[in-house]
Amino acid sequence: MSRDYPDRPHVGVGVVLCRDGMVLLIRRGKPPRLGQWSLPGGGQMLGETVEAAARREVLEETGLDLARIELLTVVDLIERDEADAVRYHYTLVDLVGEAAAGDAVAGDDAVAAAWFRPEELPGLGLWSETLRIIRLGLARIGREA
């Protein structure tokens, strides 16, 4: 199924990846949101659990393993074109996790990977839902730390 102008939503995963009070973001190398900072993640494959998809995508896009991961929230990304037709529709399952040791290196469809302090996030031009999800993830990690 085509990712643009689909006949049903695509399921994707995103991970609020934390380490030492910072959040890892990737710069997207493909649409939607080409060139923008985003959570590591991507499409779930047939026969793959949400957790397995999250772990695979984080490894592919950042080179990092996850030390811990849990469900955070679910959101919809729906973008319409000028004629009001649905160009993209993703159901995004967001998780929160802690990165295992190692350096983040951009890979797959990420063109950059970098750690950010929470106070740096508002200046990055993040999608409002991404910023909201990151805040949820940081609060969850903080409560459990």
Image (tube, rainbow, N blue to C red):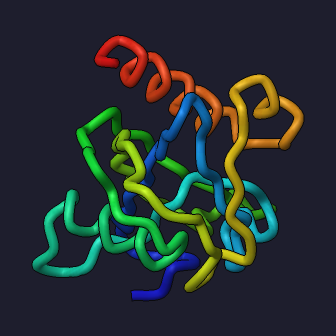
Q: Which sits in the foreground, 4 or 121?
A: 121
Residue 24 located left or right of residue 11:
right
Instruction: Count how many numbered circles sit on residues in the image.
Output: 0
Q: Position of residue 138 (x, y in %)?
A: 49, 24
Q: Position of residue 43 (x, y in %)?
A: 39, 72
Relative height, residue 145 to residue 51 (above, below) = above
The quadrant the C terminus occupies is top left
Identity of the residue drawn at 35% across and 64% down: 65
Identity of the residue drawn at 21% across and 58% down: 51
Residue 127 located left or right of residue 50:
right
The quadrant the N terminus occupies is bottom left
Q: Residue furthest left?
A: 47
Q: Which sits in the foreground, 9 or 99?
A: 99
Q: Quadrant of residue 4?
A: bottom right
Q: Position of residue 19 (x, y in %)?
A: 50, 40
Identity of the residue drawn at 43% across and 57% down: 101
Q: Residue furthest top?
A: 143
Residue 130 located left or right of residue 52:
right
Q: Position of residue 17 (x, y in %)?
A: 47, 46
Identity of the residue drawn at 49% across and 63% down: 102
